[in-house]
Amino acid sequence: MSTDFIGKKSSAAGGWGALKSCGKRLLQSGAPLSGARAMLRANQPDGFDCPGCAWGDPEHGSSFEFCENGVKAVAWEATEKRANPAFFAAHTVSELRRLSDYELELNGRLTHPMRYDAASDRYLPVAWEEAFAEIGSVLRGLDNPNRAEFYTSGRASNEAAFLYQLFVRLYGTNNFPDCSNMCHEASGVALKQAVGVGKGTVLLEDFEEADAIFVIGQNPGTNHPRMLGDLRRAAMRGARVVVFNPVREKGLERFSDPQDKVEMLRGGSTEIASHYFQPQLGGDMAAVRGMSKAVFAADDAAIAAGLPSILDQAFLAEHAAGFADYRAAVEATSWADIEDQSGLSRAEIEQAAAVYINAERVICTWAMGVTQHVHSVATIREIANFMFLRGNIGKPGAGLCPVRGHSNVQGDRTVGINEKPSEDFLAALEKEFGFAVPREHGHNVLAAIGAMLDGSAQAFIGLGGNFARATPDSALVEKALRHLKLTVHIATKPNHSHLMPGEIAFILPCLGRTEMDLNVNGQSQLISVEDSMSMVHGSAGINRPASPHLLSEVAIIAGIAATTVGNTHVDWGRLANNYDRIRDHIEATIPGFERYNERLRKPRGFHLRNSAAHREWNTTAGKATFSSGSLPEETVHQRARKGGGRFALQTFRSHDQYNTTVYGLDDRYRGVYGERQVIFINPDDLAALGAGSGERVDVIGEYNDGVERKAADFRLVPYDIPRGSIAGYYPELNVLVPLASAGEESDTPTSKSIMVSLRTREAS
């Protein structure tokens, strides 16, 4: 039995390991010097916005505003390798399917538009005009526009996303399956109910004033490393950082800032978490409710002693609705139930609550560890309830902070990528463009997959992303895509979605974020994106395009639109030739974008006003609204505990990947090297299985819907994770996520709540 894949874990996140990894990825790209030069312009006023995460850029930032993940993303895009027509001529689609995600994307940048030829099972080059004409012909030939699905990845710019939604609505549908449906949909739903706006309420500057920061279900060291710098600075000035995460993550324990010369030279690091709690999978709502229960008990004790109330009574009286019902719900929840469901002791929860009580300004952040459960909306409502108790919203240094993933996933939604658009937005589109906009709600991701499976959808267009690998139930999604009449993928590199062609299939190569986007007059085009703090930034690429045959996302959308719906209502070519004109239309239709072109060109851009941050509540009650539901009847961990030999599985990223893009096969923070098919498991569970570190298992899905789901041949890795819970990487484990298991109200796949069993194999 070999355990060579297990190595030494990093003692701290960042540090020399991060610098070494950056150098490795730049060398791997084949263009280390140009990649390094590009990084000096990342997240700068005169450069491009990092194509990685959506963490904000400080107003007073240093001259270097990038991280290890940003370097990997830029090197990945700036590679010298090319997936050109010769590459596709040398490989059939069937052959390419046998490659891993990592091996496939290593072949480099797409260079030419390609059309699938079923006879040879190969993609062949095609002229842009021919591709646009055929795509338009197929779309016009569908008997109902609702038979087409229009997917959007979070890498698309505001300009591309707005033009895309305009084209699709002019075509006649609101079918907008979007990557946000699979990650932070629950945040948007819950926050709209609680505070009236589906976005976070903080600015980056609030992290400089917070007395305590609660980090729930989030791993910034891997997913948005620049956040570690802000947490480090907060910890250094004495702020408490309270972490709730089932898995021990190195980036939340200690961080060595590669941009701190003294810390690097001394080999030092900074402790991030002042308190680290490991709830069971699905137990976050119970943990938060327990903290509220402890706050109420402390408040009762203070009042009994003749001391001022711990609660913010002024906020509750003036700004809150439903407080009495919430308090009654908390009082009715027993400590026994809270401890059983959270997996934490009462003492641990009271310790966390004490931090909250002793802090005047508190920020609560969370990510997909919270949003990918059946009860995610209820959990986020509970987080909002907890923050309301002491008025921790709408004041400096405090607020709600869902941390989005891809660099413009929030901006895409802001400019209209929404299957359930507001009436105000649709009316504004009608007024601006003079056509009847469809009102019928469209498909989200899960509904789109269902429509493809039952044959009611016949066409799929993907604006970026890797739909087949990002979505649940991988085998069903592959079947769904391959039975379509038309599949179109707008992309920078080949990925597995391209290898599931419909009857007619195109790969359309686009410019990357780091590349110069020149119009027909040779003028550089500026795009914009929105980060997790609602800051809208400009972005202008600086590298030469990987191929003279590439078009921008905007130009590709305009080309498809012109052949599909014509130019009667919109002059697509005119908009594609000057993005300022697109922004003029955004300004005319979406509140908050006044003087868009002017403000975009200022350093760091501008902030989209958040009404909740100003204590203006666009909720049904007109106030910040408490929810008062009970805890979930049962979490996935509680069900697994009853099942005998079953486990609660969560999927997550390795440190060498971003979303479905795999940069390498190492996960140094977790001590895994050269392999991705691994399962992290508590050592006591490993012993109970009678297995040893490195032994191999098949992971079997235990969702009782008659579908057999298996992820074969995974290595067991002992790790600090609660008993009964296991974890592993996506997209490899997405095959186990049932399409039918979705979040209540959010319809988000439950990738953090998967019931499985483990079947041992012969040791290697």
Image (cartoon, rainbow, N blue to C red):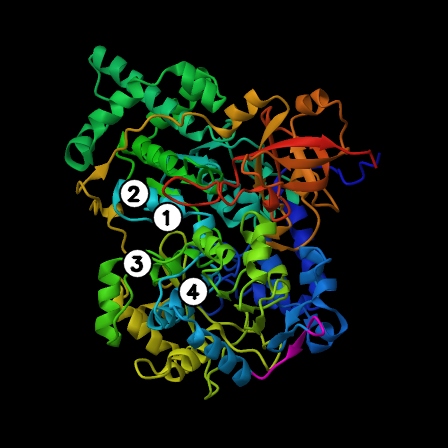
For mark 3, what is the residue? 421
- Of the residues tagged 1 and 4, which is closer to the observer? 4
Decide which of tag 4 and tag 2 comes sooner along the chain: 4
Instruction: Specify start and end residues of the magenta stretch as a single range.
Output: 119-127
User: For the residues marked 1 and 4, what is the alpha-carbon distance in whole angstroms?
Assistant: 46 Å
Pointer 2 and pointer 1: residues touching (CB < 8 Å)?
yes
Residue in the picture at 51% in, 72% down: 541
In the picture provided, is 377 more to the left or to the right than 372?
left
Quadrant in which the C terminus appears: top right
User: For the residues marked 4 and 2, what is the alpha-carbon distance in whole angstroms?
Assistant: 48 Å
Magenta stretch: includes residue 126? yes
**Closer-to-camera residue (141/382):** 141
Residue at the top extreme of this rendering: 305
Looking at the image, is 435 positioned above or below residue 192? below
Q: Secondary structure at mark 3?
A: loop
What kind of residue is marked 1?
Glu
